Amino acid sequence: MAAGVATWLPFARAAAVGWLPLAKKTMPKPPVDNSSRSDEILYVNVSGVRFQTWKNTLDRYPDTLLGSSEKEFFYNEDTQEYFFDRDPEMFRHILNFYRTGKLHYPRHECIQAFDEELAFYGIVPEIIGDCCMEEYRDRKKENQERLAEDTEANEATDAPLPPHSTSRERLWRAFENPHTSTMALVFYYVTGFFIAVSVIANVVETVPCRPPKGRVKDLPCGEKYQLAFFCMDTACVLIFTFEYLMRLFAAPSRCKFMRSVMSVIDVVAIMPYYIGLVMPENEDVSGAFVTLRVFRVFRIFKFSRHSQGLRILGYTLKSCASELGFLLFSLTMAIIIFATVMFYAEKGTKGSTFTSIPASFWYTIVTMTTLGYGDMVPNTIAGKIFGSICSLSGVLVIALPVPVIVSNFSRIYHQNQRADKMRAQQKVRLARIRMAKKGTTNAFLQYKEDRALGVRATHRGQVLTSETPNKTKDPDSDNTALCVKNRSAFEHQHHHLLHCLEKTTNHEFTDEMTYSELCMTESVGFRTSRSTSLSSQQGVQNNSTGCCPRRARRRAAMRLANSTVSVSRGSVQELDTLHIKTTSIASQNRSSLNAQASDLKLNCGEPDFTAAIISIPTPPANSPDESLPSSPAPIPGILRNTRARAFTHETVKISSL
Amino acid sequence: MGLVMGTFSLQSKQVNYHKDKADDDLEMTMVCHRPEGLDQLEAQTNFSKRELQVLYRGFKNECPSGVVNEDTFKQIYSQFFPHGDASTYAHYLFNAFDSAHTGSIKFEDFVTALSILLRGSVQEKLQWTFNLYDINRDGYINKEEMTDIVRAIYDMMGKYTYPVLKTDAPKQHVDAFFQKMDKNRDGVVTLDEFILSCQEDENIMRSLQLFENVI
């Protein structure tokens, strides 16, 4: 019901008194209205611009945000007003809707912004008043078309192949988007070349060549070099047939493909050849056959697959079909009229070329299109007068639909240009997003390292001072504290969140480099892990089919060998975490990052191994960490093994989770 | 508050712009009626100033010209009864509201009628109802008038009712009504008979109290 109706409701209810004497039964009880009936002025603050309105005004539309209790969520107790952090300019229109019952669409606003505001305030766009509805609809349609195009452009061309596509799908995609793979591109150009060759051959075939010896008349080249042309034609047709069959095979919907325009063109292009093969050398039939050869020229339309401009032209003509139809109709009308007039005007004269009305059609057409061949010319005065009127009107009638077609073409062409531009922009945008993501990941990794440093520093403080590790005089810790402080609160919380995720999944984030390292270090250090006293456990470990645990082990060994700072830090960290969390389940160490849970289907390891491992020797020599207690100087060989053992144990622990 | 009062305390005047024939349509919209002052209305009716303000705001919003003509009235009323045809009854209602028979309802008429219906005494309410039923304003309700009214009310119900509406239902209803109201069996109901009969009927008395707090 419209808002205004709500105003009249009390009156309608009051008028119900008129029914009372007629009623045979008692009236039902009226609903009890608990809400305060007194009207008050509400203050609505929209980004600093204060609006005031009666409560009644807003209550008119109870299914919107402002009319329902939803606005209480935005009520500010301190200032006794409703605060909305939205555009005040738009709000003006929204509030006017409540006041007048009509929603107007401001022409200078972006349609999407307006829609968003409407959605926020819970107003359905359909109630836009008639005055603004058309404009709104037009712009909305335009916007939707643009969006649809963009998504189409996104999906269509550069979307990566779905991982499990069949060869058929891949083939189809190669046909439709040649620039996706080199093979497709090659095929694309080869077919283009052969189309050109075929068309040129058709053309050259008819050019008169020098006659061979013994003949006087000029022969068309087609007959002189009949075999050569035949071979070329055969080759082209073979290629086209092959292409057509491949497309047919690859098409997702064969029926739809067969009905498409391009497919019809393909068929028409190659049929004459086959018909010619089948047809006998009969005189009568070969006349018809010659006509069929005309269809070979349709091969030129195959170029439209290769040229976007051609496609645009075709699309334009299709979309202007109604205008073209009108042009044709009006021309036909005019032709018939003028032809009739000319015929009767020239009927009397001797030797007149206007022998019949259909014969005059030719004159009319030639005159209206301002061709003026001069093969038919009026002789009488009346004929000349009407002839001139004919040519003048011809100019007008033909000039009318042309701007429509041109504007259509221009619009479609610009849309296409825009699609290309969007694609280029999209690439840039994606690259930027990737960089930003990498930046965040790096920031997080950096944060983890700093945390590790900080942890180490505090731990050192613990060991050295044996006090509460609040204030350590270690310069490192100060640095780390500084580093930590320079990050924003948002970053802190974000990193904490990522850390929680790591803890939850027992996996750690790492960057691309280290991951690729992981995968690369397959061959190194594998064997070393076998020759330890704990080979039983490792035997269990080795039974796991996951490559990554092994790889990780090797990687750990690799780390030792490389002794990069980050690696050392990482290993430090893993040991640190082991150390600190003796009783709790140790966190995932970096080396087992890539281990899949399914790979680690081991029997539950005994938890008491932890103790033994914690006392394992320290990280490599280049790490400045001396804080770990009971850490004898490592020997590389043993270290590798112990590392592996540590890892093994880690993995065991993980599986027991 | 004072500002609001000041805005409302304008003398009643009729602003009429006389245009030539071509602007007949415009004339309707140009007619602008301003009601009597707030104080006067408060004195004449049983509403408080605040209530009058609320009523006027709503009224003015819907009818910026200050008057409601019959078509608009019918339209508004029909919106409350979408099932059936409320135009006949709305016509009778309109006549009842338009006590001065000017052909349009001004705010004063509107408020006066509402005041009677919602805040008036039982006597006043019944009198108003009698005026509603007495279509030709001759002081008597005869069977034809009553039948018209009842039929108009049944029209508002529409076609889909339960139990199914019989064609003689209005007639039966009217007969029952006259049975009850027409004390001296002279075929018409006078005001006194009407008021007396209604006061005897407990149902009616109870129902009259229901519409107290519509505003």
Image (tube, rainbow, N blue to C red):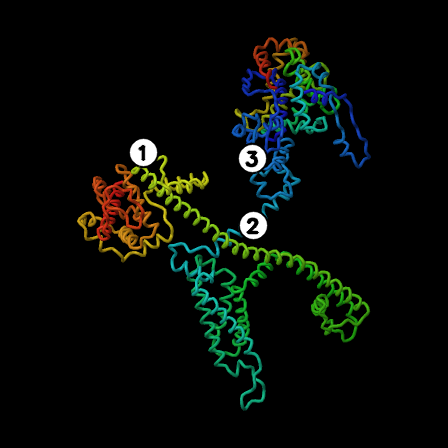
Q: Residue furthest bottom?
A: A214
First in sequence: mark 2 or mark 3?
Answer: 3
Residue A136: which quarter of the image?
top right
Label of residue A291 in the image:
none
**A67 or A334, which is in the foreground?**
A67
Query: Few, some or many C-alpha atoms within 10 Å of disc 3 (few <14, some 14-19, many ≥20)?
Result: few
Locate the N terminus of chain A and report the quarter of the image it occupies.
top right
First in sequence: mark 2 or mark 1?
Answer: 2
Query: Few, some or many C-alpha atoms within 10 Å of disc 2 (few <14, some 14-19, many ≥20)?
Result: few
Q: Which residue is mark 1?
A: A467
Q: Amino acid at mark 3?
A: Asp
Query: Few, some or many C-alpha atoms within 10 Å of disc 1 (few <14, some 14-19, many ≥20)?
Result: few
| Chain of the residue that carries numbered disc 3 in the rendered image | A
Q: Give the mark toward the camera: 2 or 1.
A: 1
**A352 or A160, which is in the foreground?**
A160
First in sequence: mark 3 or mark 1?
Answer: 3
**A571 or A500, which is in the foreground?**
A571
Residue B84: which quarter of the image?
top right
Marks 2 and 3 belong to one chain: yes
Indicate the position of residue A454 as horizontal and vertical percent values. 36, 41
Mark 2 → mark 3, Cα distance in angstroms: 30 Å
Q: Give the mark toward the camera: 3 or 1.
A: 1
Q: Which residue is mark 3?
A: A85
Helix, strand, or loop for circle 2?
helix
Q: Amino acid at mark 2?
A: Glu
Q: Which residue is mark 2?
A: A145
